[in-house]
Amino acid sequence: MATTSIPLLTKRLVLREWQTDDWVFAHQWSSDPKAVAYMQFGPNTEEETKEFIFKVITYQTEEPRLHFELAVTLKETGEVIGGCGIRIVDAENQTASMGYMYTQRYWGHGYGTEAAAALVDFGFSKLKVHRIWATCDPENIGSARILEKAGMRKEAHFRQHMLVRGQWRDSLLYAILEDEYAALKQTDKR
Ligand SMILES: CC(C)(COP(=O)(O)OP(=O)(O)OC[C@H]1O[C@@H](n2cnc3c(N)ncnc32)[C@H](O)[C@@H]1OP(=O)(O)O)[C@@H](O)C(=O)NCCC(=O)NCCS
C-alpha cells in the first residue's frame, strides 16, 4: 500500500503524521464543547486526548496500513489547526470512510474544504479504494458543504442514528465512487 505520499500537501496545508507532543493542539478542539457538539466523544479530558494521540500514532506502523489519521498543519507556520483521517473500513469491498475536525478559530477559512479534497484524492489515487463515505449531522451545515464540495452525493438520511450525550441524532451519509471522482477530475481538473 502506498504510504510514501504522506505528508499530503495542498495549497496552504500539510497533512502529516501525528506526533506525541501534538496532543496539546488536538486538545484545543477535542475539549471544546462547540467543536464536539456533533461528535460522539467529548469534550475530552487531557488524558482522553493523549490516549487518542497515542492510538493514532500506533496506526502509523500498521501492516498493511488501514488507518490514516493525520494532523492538519498550516504550511506557512507549521501550526496544527485540526485533524483528519481516511480509513479502509472494508478492505474486501475497497471502501474507506473519512472525517475531520478543526480548532474553532480556524473555521470558515476553507481549510476543511482543502483537506477533504486531499483526502478524497489520496483515497482514490493511492489507497485505490472504490468508494469513500462520510457522515455528518444534518445540522452540521459546514461539514455537509465540505462533503458536497469534495464531490460526494447525499445517499441517505438516517433517523436517530446516534446517541450523542443522551440525545438521539440523525446522520446524513455522503459518498463518492472512483468513477465519479475520475469524471470530476476531468471536468474541474482537480
Ligand atoms: C465543520 C467544520 C469541519 C468546517 O470546517 P471549515 O474549515 O470551517 O470549513 P470551510 O471553511 O472549508 O467551509 C466549507 C463550506 O461550509 C460553509 N460553512 C462552514 N461553516 C459553516 C456554518 N457553521 N454554517 C454554515 N455554513 C458553513 C462555508 O461557508 C463553506 O461553504 P462555501 O464554500 O459554499 O462558502 C468545522 O467547523 C469543524 O471542525 N467543526 C467541528 C468538528 C466537526 O463538526 N467535524 C465534522 C464532523 S462530521
Image (cartoon, helix red, strand yellow):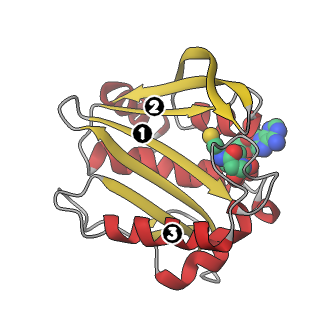
Local crowd size for mark 3, using a 10 Å CA cut-off: few (<14), some (14–19), many (≥20): few
* Front of the two marks 1 and 2: 1
Dividing the image into 4 quarters, which one contains the N terminus? bottom left
Characterize the local packing of mark 2: few (<14), some (14-19) or many (20 or more) Cα atoms within 10 angstroms. Answer: few
Tell me the kind of residue under disc 2: Thr
In this picture, residue 182 sits left or right of residue 162: left
Q: Position of residue 43 (x, y in %)?
A: 73, 57
Residue 137: give x, y in percent of width and height: 68, 30
Give the labeled residue for mark 2.
187
**119 vs 38: above or below:** below
Q: Are marks 1 and 2 in contact (CB under 8 Å)?
A: no
Q: Number of numbered discs present?
A: 3
**What is the C-alpha distance between the residues marked 3 and 1?**
22 Å
**Dot 3 and dot 1 residues touching (CB under 8 Å):** no
For residue 20, the mark is none
At mark 3, the secondary structure is: helix
Q: Earlier in the sequence, mark 1 or mark 2?
A: 1
> Which amino acid type is shown beneath numbered disc 3?
Glu
The residue that disc 1 covers is 97
What's the residue at 51%, 62% (across, down)? 10
Residue at 69% from the left image edge and 67% from the top image edge: 45
In x, y percent, where is residue 66? 27, 52
